[in-house]
Image (cartoon, rainbow, N blue to C red):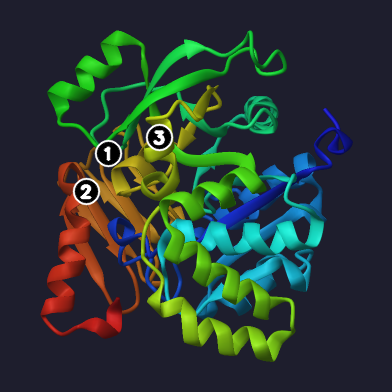
Amino acid sequence: MSIGEFDDFYAIIPAGGTGTRLWPLSRAACPKFLYDLLGSGRSMLQATFDRLTPLAGAGHVVVSTGAQHEAAVREQLPQLGPQNLFTEPVPRDSMAAIALATTVLARRHGRDIVVGSFAADHVIRDNRAFAESVRQAIAAARAGYVTTIGIAATRPSTAFGYIRQGRSLADRIPDAPDARIVERFVEKPDAATALAYLSTGDYRWNAGMFVMRADVLLDRLREFKPELAETIDRIADAWVDGPDARLVAMDRYWPGLEKIAVDYAIAEPLSLAGGVAVVPGGFGWDDVGDFNSLAALLPSVTRTNVKIAGDAERVSCLDCAGDVVVPGSGRLVALLGVDDLVVVDTPDVLLVAPRARSQEVKDMVAHVRESGHVDVL
C-alpha cells in the first residue's frame, strides 16, 4: 500500500479538548494528546501523525489545535509544515476546525481532494488494519459519500455513540467491498440498550472519524449550516492573505462560530438522505476517555492487576488489587490495603477515586471549578 495510491488524500488531525475525565493529568494547558500515556515513547499526537503519514505523506497532514498549544505541537511535530498548522483562539468543536482546514486545503489543491478527520487522542493497535479501513473509506468518499469508520463493538459500552449500519454498498463501490450505508447515528445508550445493540451485530461505535471529498463536505455545510459556512469562507479569504490578516480574521470571526461537532452538523442530517457510508474498523481502538479505559491499555505490574501509568519505581503497593496509579509528582506513592482505586499524584493536585466512578471525574472538575480552584484546571 503506497503513498501514491492516496495522492488526493489529506489528513486533518483535530487536536482539541481538555480530557476532563483524565484530570488532573490532562488539563487545559496540557491536554491528553500531548502525553505519552502508554509509555510508547511517542505522545498520542505523535502516534496519530506517525499513523497517517504513510497513507497521505507528511506534506498532506495538517493539525488544528488551540493557539495555546501551538508551541507544544510544533515541538512534538517538527516535520509538520508551517502552513499545515491551524490554530484557534478559542475552541469551537470539530465542525469549525475541519471546515476551515478543508476550505483552505481546497483552495490550495482543488475541491475534488479527499479529506479525512482523525482525532489526536485515540489509541489504535493495528496500523495495517487501520490503513485498510482508510483505503476503503477513501474509495467511498471518492464515490460521493461522507464516510465514517465504525469501530467493532467489543462490549456493551455506554461511553460511546453508535452507528447503525444498513445495506451493503459493495455493488456501487467495488473498491470498498465492506462499505455499508449508515441508517442512523444514535447517542450514548444506557446499559440495557447497549447490550441490545451488541446482540444485533448491526451497530458499531462512532469514533468520530470521517472521510469525504472536500466539495461534498463544503456543499453540505452550506446546505445545513449556511451561516457557519459563510463565516468560514471569510476566514479562509484572510488565511491566504498572510499571517497578519489571518490573526485579525480569527479574532474577529472565530469566537462567534457555532460550537458543534461534525457528527451533528453534517453526518446525522445527511444520513437521513442516505448520504453517509460506514466501513468497518477492526483495528483495536480506544479514545482513552477515562482512567478505567487507560487501565485496560496498560500491563499489570503485579499479580493483583495493579496498573501504573508512569514511573513504576515511584509506586509501592502492599496488599492492593486493581488500582490505577499515576505517579507524577516525583515523590513515592505508597498504597496499603486498598483495591480498585484511581490515584493520580501531580505536583499540585492529588486525585483519589473509585475506578468504578472514573467517568465522574469530569464532575469533580466542575466541582473544583465552582469551588474557585481554576488554577489547577
Three-letter amino acid code of the residue under disc 1: Ala
Earlier along the polypeptide chain: callout 2 or callout 1? 1
Q: Disc 2 marks which amino acid? A: Gln
Which residue: 70% across, 27% down? 139
The amino acid sitting under disc 3 is: Asn
The Cα–Cα distance between marks 2 and 1, rounded to whole angstroms, is: 8 Å
> Is 141 placed above or below 113 here?
above
The one of 25 and 155 positioned closer to us in this rendering:
155
Please identify the quarter of the rendering in which residue 147 is found: top right
Front disc: 3 or 2: 3
Q: Dot 3 corresponds to which residue? A: 206
Disc 3 crowd rating (10 Å Cα; few below 14, some 14-19, many 20+) is many
> Foreground mark, 2 or 1?
1
Name the residue carrying label 1.
Answer: 159
**Where does label 2 land, which residue?**
359
Identify the element where label 2 is drawn: helix
Residue at (31% x, 36% y) in the render: 161
Quarter of the image for the C terminus: give it: bottom left
Q: Is residue 355 above or below residue 13?
A: above
Question: Circles 2 and 1: CB distance less than 8 Å?
Answer: yes
Return the mark for residue 223: none
Say which residue appears at 74% left-offset and 84% top-offset: 242
Q: Disc 1 vs disc 3: Cβ atoms closer than 8 Å?
A: no
The extreme right residue here reads 4
Residue 279 at x, y percent in the picture: 55, 23
* Residue 103 picture quarter: bottom right
Mark found first going from the N terminus, 3 or 2: 3
Residue 118 at least partly seen: no
Helix, strand or loop status at disc 3: strand
